[in-house]
Amino acid sequence: MFAASTQCKHWMFSNEEELNKLREAANTNHIQTYGKNIDAVAKYDFFLTPEEEKIMVKRFELHLRDFCKRFQPSMPRCVVGTAFHYFKRFYINNSVMNYHPKEIMVTCIYLACKVEEFNVSIQQFVANIKGDREKATDIILNNELLLMEQLNFHLSIHNPFRPVEGLLIDIKA
């Protein structure tokens, strides 16, 4: 089943260098689009390097984990795993300078809740967010289609949890 999945066909990479090239292309594309009139030497005074973007994404992965841990009602592991996949996939082909990681992070989590059938309404979801809940609702709903498009509508994720749980059941039996 996994071998025929979109995850295997489109989201498995042979090495980290391949991933880095895609991330660098997203970074370069942003800089070329918005830095046309800036001297080449001064560009990185105004824009993030690919390495700085990678660090920023890693930092927001920690925020994603913490948000999911604090979430009420308690969030299943498969939802957390799916949200991580969406977040990481999104920033393979997109720059953090184009889309704020905080906004994409909550959208990834909300979409993962839907896909993994963890039924929470948007009101229940944003109740877990600090700050303006109406604004958070607008951000999530406005970014949801963008996120799905950037994931090429490949929403099915094969998380490692089920096979491991099955193995543990087999070992106990």
Image: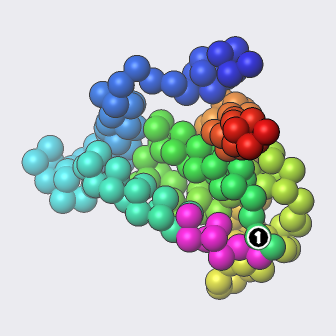
Q: Which residue lies at the image location 18% right of the left edge and 59% below the top edge?
A: 45
Residue 130 sits inside the magenta stretch:
no
Q: Nearer the viewer, residue 167 or 151?
A: 167
Instruction: Name the outermost residue toward the bottom.
Output: 131
Instruction: Name the outermost residue toward the left.
Output: 41
Image quarter for residue 30?
top left
Bin the neighbour count of mark 1 within 10 Å (Cα to Cα): few under 14, some 14-19, many 20 and up. few
Q: Which residue lies at the image location 74% right of the left edge and 43% below the top edge?
A: 172
Tally the marks. 1
From where the camera sits, is residue 44 visible? yes
Q: Position of residue 96 (x, y in %)?
A: 43, 53
Which residue has dot 1 on it?
A: 74
Q: Position of residue 103 (x, y in %)?
A: 59, 62
SS at badge 1? loop
Write down the region rendered in magenta.
65-72
From where the camera sits, is residue 25 visible? no
